[in-house]
């Protein structure tokens, strides 16, 4: 049992991870400014776990608030989800992204060092890989210059952490490179609740299904893929949450900085996702083909063998499970947590 500080713990992936942490017997302190989430998610996590967690409303850019948390709670390790993640927005307001994701992360690491806490799991992304690499992507492949500022912030924080671990052997850091997180907890009580028009495929599909959006635009049907639409590695958010527990266990017993891909190792096309959603849930998804979206690659899926071999982790859920659980959440919560 350990006491874990979860930054961004009220968000989509964070809330699912808090639940798995509580279920595994850990103590959880959530630090979140609620800029893209609702405290209601944490009420539901506690209800599901039948256990309590500590919630501190605060911002990772504010050193005093961070230092206070470390002073008030004997933290053993940190899982760092807090950050902004809208790709399009990151192109319009890059400084806000640099400040939140890069400067905010640096501030967190400073407070950790001050408090003598050196075990960290960081939310990275498959977007850090050089686009010239061919899928399946593995961790020995080169990183590149991401096509957007959001991806750039992930790359910079990864590089900062590698240098930190090189400079000081007390650090033990996991870089988890997520592929495409989708799905929701099977209860339907917690799930993804994007503000405004969703950028990502899955919330867009469920919002069309529930009648909040008219139709899905499929960005490009002329890629060199099985049916011309983009291929991605969708991973159930509960499998992803569990990967954090496995990474935590690994890091509590090791030193240095190491990256792991978290995906299923299997790619699915946009059309396959849409068709499977219709088939599993019995709901029609109106759609149209639209031009390619700037910055998208044709295909991205993981070689996940390093995570399976080293972290004692194994994804459990199929694409059908992911699509059924996404719909179950959206159906029960047509307007998210509001
Ligand atoms: P999310 O927006 O649901 O969660 C992020 C949380 O961080 C939110 O609760 C938000 O309020 C909080 N936050 C943002 N800025 C903060 C700040 N300055 N101080 C304190 N809290 C702050 O997003 P998510 O999908 O759960 O993603 C979690 C992490 O995983 C992010 O770092 C994201 O970049 C990364 N990631 C997500 C995906 C994805 O597709 N969802 C893919 C790869 C990586
Ligand atoms: N897509 C559509 N229509 C939509 C939304 C998406 O056809 O309305 C397609 C995309 O073109 C892509 C696939 O669905 O082929 C998946 O798109 P998402 O936006 O859901 O996911 P991405 O793979 O683009 O995004 C991921 C991560 C981000 C990361 C980004 C880097 O979710 O965190 O890769 O490009 F930054």
Image: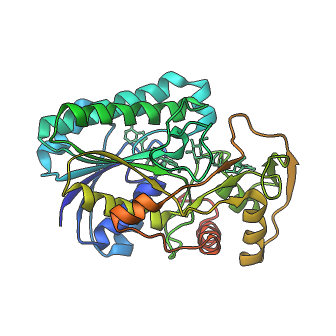
**Which corner quadrant of the image does residue 205 belong to?**
bottom right
Quadrant hosting residue 210: bottom right
Vertical comparison of 113 with 81: above or below: above
Q: Is residue 217 above or below residue 95?
A: below
Residue found 80% across the figure and 46% down from its top: 223
Point out residue 187 in the picture as x, y percentages from the top left corner.
50, 76
Residue 43 visible from this viewpoint:
no
Q: Picture quarter containing residue 280?
A: bottom right
Q: In the image, what residue occupies the spot 20% across and 48% down?
A: 255
> Is 87 above or below relative to 336?
above
Q: Nearer the viewer, residue 297 or 52?
A: 297
Left or right: 208, with 140 as reference point: right
The outermost residue toward the right is: 288
Q: How is the image coloured?
A: rainbow
Task: Work out whether 285 lies above or below 143.
Answer: below
Most foreground residue, 236 or 144: 144
* Position of residue 179 measured from the top left corner of the image (x, y, whole percent): 54, 53
The number of callouts visible is 0
Q: Nearer the viewer, residue 196 or 168?
A: 168
- Kindly tell me whether residue 50 is visible in this rendering: yes
Provide residue 108's location: percent of width, then percent of height: 27, 36
Residue at 56 percent across and 36 percent down: it is: 130
Quadrant occupied by the C terminus: bottom right
| Image x and y of residue 43, in percent | 38, 64
Quadrant location of the N terminus in the rendered image = bottom left
């Amino acid at each position: 049992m350990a006491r874990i500080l979860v930054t961004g713990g009220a968000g989509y992936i964070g809330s699912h991870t808090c639940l798995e942490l509580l279920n595994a017997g850990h103590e959880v302190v959530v630090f979140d400014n609620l800029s893209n989430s609702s405290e209601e998610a944490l009420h539901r996590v506690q209800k599901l776990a039948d256990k309590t967690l500590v919630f501190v409303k605060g911002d990772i850019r504010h050193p005093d608030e961070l230092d206070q948390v470390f002073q008030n709670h004997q933290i053993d390790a940190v899982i760092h989800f807090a950050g902004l993640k809208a790709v399009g927005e990151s192109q319009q307001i890059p400084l806000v992204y640099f400040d939140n994701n890069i400067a905010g992360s640096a501030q967190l690491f400073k407070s950790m060092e001050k408090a003598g806490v050196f075990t960290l799991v960081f939310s990275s992304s498959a977007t850090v890989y050089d686009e010239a690499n061919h899928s399946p992507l593995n961790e020995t492949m080169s990183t590149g210059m991401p096509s957007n500022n959001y991806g750039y912030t992930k790359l910079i924080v990864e590089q900062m952490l590698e240098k930190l671990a090189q400079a000081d052997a007390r650090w033990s850091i996991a870089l988890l490179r997520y592929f495409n997180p989708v799905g929701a907890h099977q209860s339907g009580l917690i799930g993804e609740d994007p503000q405004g028009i969703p950028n990502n495929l899955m919330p867009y599909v469920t919002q069309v299904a529930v009648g909040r959006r008219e139709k899905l635009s499929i960005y490009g049907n002329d890629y060199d893929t099985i049916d011309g639409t983009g291929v991605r590695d969708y991973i159930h958010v509960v499998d992803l949450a569990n990967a954090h527990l496995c990474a935590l266990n690994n890091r509590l017993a090791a030193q240095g900085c190491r990256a792991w891909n978290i995906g299923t190792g299997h790619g699915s096309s946009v059309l396959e996702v849409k068709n499977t959603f219709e088939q599993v849930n019995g709901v029609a998804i109106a759609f149209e083909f639209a031009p390619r979206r700037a910055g998208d690659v044709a295909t991205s899926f993981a070689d996940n063998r390093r995570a399976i071999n080293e972290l004692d982790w194994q994804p459990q859920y199929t694409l059908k499970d992911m699509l059924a659980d996404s719909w179950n959440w959206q159906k029960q919560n047509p307007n998210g947590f509001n």
